[in-house]
């Protein structure tokens, strides 16, 4: 937010506060690599449906936040998987995690980083090639997630999270005009949201114990040519940051429905690693620039030199301890949806694998989301941690969602998460997507205007959160 010089207080009263939160925090991580040969069919164009190797480790990272009143912890958990294909798939893992931790549903945001080179997340593929390995793997992963959450809870300590916005230009617009419609591909004619949101978690001694990275960019570097399991660019970014900091990095995929790497849709691991280095080095640059934990800046004095110089100094502050949790179930408009039989007829001439991929997804999207009266509710979880607000929802929202929330609420740091909890695993496109007949507009169940409606409802909820007072 721009401030004119006439709006500033006298020099002796000028202060600069970083966004922060004082919480009781623990972070833990597990490696959850699947077995070679597991079903890993994310691309309709893929000629192989099983994994032949591991590019980089698949991980789950858990963050537990405890309040001072002894209430149930909040768990923010990431997994290097793609997306839930249906409600049963989500609950087969998330439901077991909730049960294993003995918590309420709204105390967990289970987030998938959205890699398109991950293991299959479906719970009903046992009869397909590599599908017999999926259920045992999911049980192993679920146990690991629960263990990581418990470790994070048990090691939670008084900590301060310093929040900041930065920049990373890995993501580009991926809506490429092609005649009367758009295809999914790099569009050099449109700009992309380059916001990188970072949280540095430090204990009372100032020692860093974890980082939170929120960035919007589809992990689609490795595509149908690749047959190895991979977290895509998230893997090398995380390894770079963790090697430097020595602590776990929690990656949160942002509102990336219209964003992807410029260099993508390849089978070359080095391209994925290069994309990750772009994100990783941007993150490390932000960490280097951050002010020490528990500090703010105030104007100290004028210094007469060749010019009149202004000297600032650090001083200690108390970060806000506020925690708030909101669950929204937003009434959303549905498109005039074709039947599954009509879709089968529409796609009859497609490659059989691509056709079945589309049909299966269309069927699963509707189950558990569309209610008996043919209406729908889209769930959103809003957590306030000090100066930051974390907004999680299951869809693939376009970047408009995060950009608009940040524009409307410049006094807070806003983290937006796609692919979180469920149901509602579908695109949330902008109006031009419907007019341009993009894939995202016919993949989703939602009618034009749903994204704007959700944005307004979430923004209104953020406005109702307590205001943080600065010293």
Image (spheres, rainbow, N blue to C red):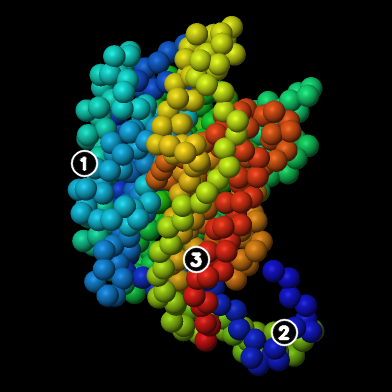
The quadrant holding residue 423 is top left
Question: Label 2 near label 1: C-beta < 8 Å?
Answer: no
Numbered tag placed on residue 143 in the rendering: 1
Q: Tell me which numbered mark, 1 or 2, is placed earlier along the sequence.
A: 2
Q: Tell me which numbered mark, 2 or 3, is placed earlier along the sequence.
A: 2
Report x, y in % for residue 192.
Answer: 68, 44
Q: Which residue is mark 3?
A: 388
Image height of 253 relative to 297, above or below:
above
Residue found 26% across the figure and 32% down from its top: 138
Residue found 43% across the figure and 13% down from its top: 48
Q: CA distance from mark 2 to mark 3?
A: 24 Å
Report x, y in % for residue 182.
Answer: 71, 27
Q: Is residue 451 left or right of residue 224?
A: right
Report x, y in % for residue 245.
Answer: 40, 56
Q: Which residue is mark 2?
A: 8
Residue found 48% across the figure and 46% down from its top: 377
Mark 1: few, some, or many residues within 10 Å (few <14, many ≥20)? some
Mark 3: few, some, or many residues within 10 Å (few <14, many ≥20)? many
Mark 2: few, some, or many residues within 10 Å (few <14, many ≥20)? few
Asked whether residue 159 is in view, the answer is: yes
Report x, y in % for residue 28.
Answer: 29, 53
Give the SS element for disc 2. Answer: loop
């Amino acid at each position: 937010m721009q401030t004119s010089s006439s709006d500033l207080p006298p020099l002796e009263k000028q202060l600069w506060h970083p966004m922060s939160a004082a919480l009781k925090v623990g972070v833990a991580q597990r490696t959850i690599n699947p077995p070679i040969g597991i079903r890993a069919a994310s691309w309709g164009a893929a000629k192989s449906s099983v994994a032949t190797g591991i590019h980089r480790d698949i991980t789950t990272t858990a963050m537990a936040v405890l309040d001072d009143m002894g209430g149930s912890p909040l768990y923010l958990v990431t997994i290097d998987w793609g997306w839930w294909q249906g409600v049963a798939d989500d609950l087969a893992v998330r439901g077991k995690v909730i049960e294993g931790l003995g918590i309420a549903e709204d105390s967990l945001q289970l987030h998938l980083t959205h890699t398109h080179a991950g293991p299959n997340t479906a719970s009903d593929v046992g009869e397909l090639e590599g599908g017999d390995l999926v259920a045992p793997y999911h049980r192993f992963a679920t146990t690991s997630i629960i263990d990581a959450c418990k470790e994070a809870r048990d090691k939670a300590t008084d900590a301060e999270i310093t929040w900041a916005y930065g920049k990373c230009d890995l993501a580009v617009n991926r809506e490429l005009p092609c005649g009367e419609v758009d295809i999914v591909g790099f569009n050099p004619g449109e700009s992309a949201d380059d916001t990188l949101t970072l949280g540095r978690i430090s204990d009372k001694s100032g020692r860093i114990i974890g980082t939170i990275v929120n960035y919007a960019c589809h992990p689609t570097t490795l595509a149908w040519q690749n047959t190895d399991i991979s977290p895509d660019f998230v893997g090398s970014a995380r390894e770079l940051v963790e090697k430097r900091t020595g602590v776990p990095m929690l990656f949160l995929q942002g509102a990336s429905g219209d964003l992807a790497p410029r260099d993508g849709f390849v089978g070359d691991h080095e391209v994925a690693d290069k994309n990750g280095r772009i994100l990783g080095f941007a993150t490390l640059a932000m960490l280097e620039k951050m002010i020490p934990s528990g500090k703010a800046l105030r104007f100290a004095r004028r210094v007469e030199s060749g010019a009149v110089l202004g000297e600032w100094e650090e001083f200690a502050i108390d970060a806000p301890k506020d925690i708030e949790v909101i669950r929204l179930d937003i009434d959303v408009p549905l498109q005039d949806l074709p039947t599954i039989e009509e879709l089968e007829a529409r796609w009859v001439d497609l490659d059989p694998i691509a056709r079945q991929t589309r049909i299966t997804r269309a069927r699963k999207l509707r189950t558990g989301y569309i209610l008996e009266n043919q209406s729908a509710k889209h769930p959103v979880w809003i957590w306030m941690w000090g100066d930051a607000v974390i907004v999680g929802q299951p869809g693939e929202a376009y970047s408009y969602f995060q950009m608009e929330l940040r524009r409307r609420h410049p006094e807070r740091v806003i983290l937006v998460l796609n692919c979180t909890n469920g149901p509602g695993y579908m695109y949330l496109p902008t109006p031009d997507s419907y007019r341009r007949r993009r894939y995202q507009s016919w993949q989703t169940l939602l009618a034009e205007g749903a994204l704007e409606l959700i944005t307004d409802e979430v923004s209104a909820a953020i406005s109702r959160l307590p205001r943080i007072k600065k010293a």
